[in-house]
Image (cartoon, grey):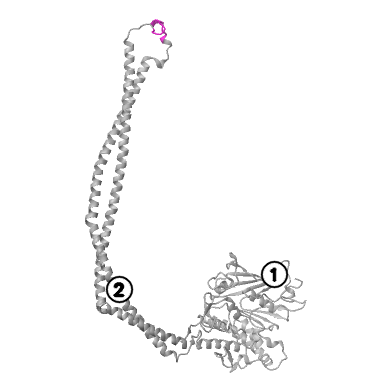
Amino acid sequence: MSDSGFYITKLSVTGPAKSPAELLFKDGLNVVCGASDTGKSFASSCVDFAFGASKSPRPIPELSGYQTVSLELCVRKDGEQIKIERGLSGGNVRIVRKDASGNDISDKTFPVKHKAADAETLSGILLTISELWGKQIRKNKDGVLRSLSFRDIAYIINVDEERIIAERPPQLSESPVERTSENEVFRSLITGHESGAVVVVPGKEDIAGMEAKIELLGGMIEEATQSIEKMGLTESALRKEWDDMEAARQLAISSYGEARTSVTQLESELKSQAQSLRELDERAAVVHGLLSRFALLEEHYDSDIARLTAIEETGTLLQAMPSKPCPVCGALPESHRLNHAVEQFELPVVQAAAKREREKISQLKDDLAQVIDELRKEFDDSQNKRGQVESSINTLQSNIADELMPRVKVSAEALKGQNDRRDLLLIGLRTIENTGGLKKQQSDLETLRADAKSAVPKITSTATTAEMDGFAQTVEAILKAWKYPNTGRVVFSETNQDLVIGEHTRSSHGKGVRALTCAAFMLGIMQHCKTKNLPHPFVSLLDSPLVAYQEPDGEGESQTLKQAGVKDAFYASLATGLVGGQVIIFENEDPSADIAGTFVKHHFTGTSSGRKGFFPVGS
């Protein structure tokens, strides 16, 4: 998980017709420094607001006309670019996502508030890229769990100027209600595990309840024992009869299954044969209808042939008869103008046409006779096949009714006859098993009752002593790299939930040491996670960790730290990647010009020379 998390590349505050207030960052060390009241702490609060803080950044005169806070991130794992936009008046956030090459992935609006079962929120997205989504933490001493929110993580990674000098442990707020969950978030990061379980032992009322349950269980056991005795069977005899009955039952079930399978197969075949019979009858009806219609057609053909034959014979007779005057007009035969008659009405032409038509109809009649013969053959074949199908159907019905159904009935009756006795035996076996369970519950309760008076409630720790000691050693190494004087042994006190440095509690020092050691505490968490390959956003924002240097002529601890060269060592170690990840420092004084390593520096002058502050001049 060393590639979990992200780093901030840009913070901006924008508004219509306003020049944007911007800060560019890179992975590693970033320093925003300069005069007081130039917007350093305001910029830090804008980052926290973009991370989902419910409270908007405090109103300042320079903010007039600005409406939106934008925070741009780069995901360490794959280089994805994420832009978070949130209106200064609150509400949902707009999140624009692009891949490492700048190609659009999505542009959506998401709720700010964390939802335990919904990763599609600002909190869910930031937790997911930090590989912390889905973790559970304990929120009270009773062990009630809740899901981890990114606001829990934001409290660890973003420390403002008031909290960094506080006397309380760095991971805790002033709220006693949140103390349990805040400690659990810190320990979960150190270990990579979710909150430990709560082991609760019974109190006096619980013990009284146990005794009542033990008495109730005793009565139930006695009743069950008497019930078994009434059956007149010992446990071994009951189990043997059950086994014998189950063996016989399995045989009956097998026989019943085989018979039913055979019946099903025959019924399927019977259905198929019945379908064939219906198809044969339907085709026979069609063929019979065709034969009737074709018989009528054959009669028409015969009639037409007879008519055409008569036409031919009548023409021949007319030619053989002697010529006579016209019976209509009385004109003599020689007066008729035969050469003027229409050709198709000439007798030879009419006779030839009648002959051709008769021959054509005769051919059609021959074709029809062939079709009729084929249909009659098909009809006869279908009737023969129908007889075969009917015979098959009768055989199947006989097999089902006379052979298989009696077998099914016998098997079913055998199973039914076992049911009453089987139910009784089953009740007996369950009673025996339940009695065993009741006896175990009674024994367990008696054991708990015996141990309850001497038992003490406890919570299984999320972090072991070795894990917390490993974290403390990481902080010790950071302080030594910063040339913190008289570091001594650094340990984590379970009593105070804070560091003990060189036998002195962290809170016992002045604000300068508290600020520096708070910074070491928070950066120690990040470096510990990096070393142990544990999930973390790997971003840390610290406001005024070198507050001791606000009064360079001071005495005591401030002067001791100044003489030890802590400031230069602080910046030099972070610039060379001491803790890994991104560190953004908001501080009054600039780092020394000769600090080794590379880092980004934004200097606010507070004057017209150089960059005056976070907001552009005249914006």
Q: Which residue is mark 1?
A: 67
Instruction: Check disc 2: other Cα within 10 Å, few if <14, some if 14-19, many if 20+.
Output: some
Image-based side of 405 in relation to 21, left or right: left
Given the image, on which type of amino acid does mark 2 rest? Leu
Real-space Cα separation, disc 1 to disc 2, in angstroms: 75 Å
Q: Determine whether 395 is above or below 372 in the image.
A: below
What amino acid type is highlighted by mark number 1? Gln
**Residue 40 position in % (x across, y down):** 69, 78
Where residue 224 sits, quadrant-wise, is bottom left
Q: Residue at x 33, y 12 (%)?
A: 318
Closer-to-camera residue (320/407): 407
Going from the N terminus, do you reach mark 1 or mark 2 first?
1
**Residue 426, disc:** 2
The magenta stretch spans which residues?
Answer: 326-338
Inspect the magenta stretch and tell me whether residue 359 lies in it.
no
| Residue 61 placement, left or right of 308 | right
Mark 1: secondary structure: loop
| Quadrant of res 327 | top left
